[in-house]
């Protein structure tokens, strides 16, 4: 895959000659045909445009010309550009909307509109907005909402389990106290020391005793 600045790290293994060529005497780079891995997707123009600058080996930068948006839990975009036989990839984030107005600050009620509870109505509105980067970001937010819920449920289960274990440990401690366990065991240890028990002697004394 490629870095966020668009420099490729993996070439497309097509098994065929490159689909791109440079016309002699011109700076423009021309496609001979659309790369096979984008035949069923779209050009990066119009309402489908995704800002994706790609820097080629000659240090010239162009916007991606063909894209494929992958709506996984962490959405990303794959891209191609004329003059390169490589596939570029990076996470797909919502494009900032520039305005002279202050940036809004959303509360929980605002975010509820974008969450998993309002999928149908929100998706219908996103279709009208026609911003694939915004759609991807809303998709990511819903995924994170589900993940937070899953982890919180797991943490609650672990807290309940921990509570039961602590209660059992407390009960066990009380029984050991009632049995006067520490005093009885300590008394036996001290008695063994006084009698010179072999298992309490240093190991070198035990070895010397066997040799003698």
Image (cartoon, helix red, strand yellow):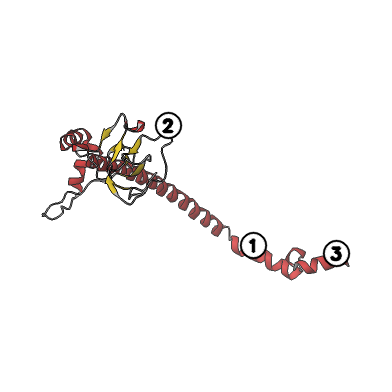
Q: Which is more foreground, mark 2 or mark 3?
A: 2
Residue under the point 31% across and 29% down: 39
Could you say which disc has been placed on residue 16 in the image?
2
Secondary structure under the numbered disc 1 in the rendered image: helix
Q: Is residue 207 above or below residue 39?
A: below
**Residue placed under numbered mark 3 in the picture:** 210
Could you say which disc has been placed on residue 185 in the image?
1
* Crowding near the residue tagged with mark 1, few <14, some 14–19, many ≥20 C-alpha atoms within 10 Å: few
Q: Could you say where residue 157 lies in the image, as x and y percent from the top left?
A: 40, 45
Q: Earlier in the sequence, mark 3 or mark 1?
A: 1
Q: Earlier in the sequence, mark 2 or mark 3?
A: 2
Q: Which is more foreground, mark 3 or mark 1?
A: 3
Q: Earlier in the sequence, mark 2 or mark 1?
A: 2
Q: Give the distance between the C-alpha atoms of the residues marked 2 and 1, in whole angstroms.
A: 81 Å
Please, which residue is most extreme toward the right here?
212
Q: Are marks 2 and 1 in contact (CB under 8 Å)?
A: no
Q: Give the distance between the C-alpha atoms of the residues marked 2 and 3, in whole angstroms.
A: 81 Å
Seen from the viewer's position, the closer of residues 117 and 201 is 117
Could you say which disc has been placed on residue 123 in the image?
none
Point out the image quarter for the C terminus: bottom right
Seen from the viewer's position, the closer of residues 125 and 204 is 125
Q: Could you say where residue 168 lies in the image, as x and y percent from the top left?
A: 49, 50
Seen from the viewer's position, the closer of residues 126 and 43 is 43
Does residue 102 appear to the left or right of 135 in the view shown?
left
Number of numbered discs overlaid on the protein picture: 3
- Quadrant of residue 50 within the rendered picture: top left
Q: Are marks 2 and 3 in contact (CB under 8 Å)?
A: no
Q: Could you say where residue 105 lies in the image, as x and y percent from the top left?
A: 17, 53
Q: Which is more foreground, mark 2 or mark 1?
A: 2
């Amino acid at each position: 895959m490629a870095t966020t600045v668009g420099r490729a790290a993996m070439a497309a293994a097509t098994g065929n000659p490159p689909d791109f060529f440079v016309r002699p005497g011109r700076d423009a780079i021309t496609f001979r045909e659309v790369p096979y891995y984008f035949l069923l997707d779209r050009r990066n123009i119009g309402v489908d445009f995704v800002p994706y600058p790609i820097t080629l080996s000659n240090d010239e930068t162009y916007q991606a010309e063909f894209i494929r948006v992958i709506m996984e839990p962490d959405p990303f975009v794959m891209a191609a550009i004329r003059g390169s036989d490589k596939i570029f990839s990076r996470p797909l984030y919502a494009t900032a909307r520039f305005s002279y107005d202050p940036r809004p600050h959303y509360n929980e009620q605002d975010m509820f509109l974008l969450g998993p509870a309002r999928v149908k109505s929100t998706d219908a509105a996103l279709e009208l907005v026609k911003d694939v980067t915004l759609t991807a970001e809303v998709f990511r937010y819903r995924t994170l909402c589900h993940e937070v819920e899953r982890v919180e449920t797991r943490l609650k289960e672990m807290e309940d389990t921990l509570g039961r274990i602590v209660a059992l440990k407390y009960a066990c401690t009380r029984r050991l106290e009632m049995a006067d366990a520490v005093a009885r065991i300590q008394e036996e240890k001290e008695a063994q020391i006084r009698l010179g028990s072999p298992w309490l002697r240093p190991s070198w004394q035990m070895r010397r005793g066997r040799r003698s």
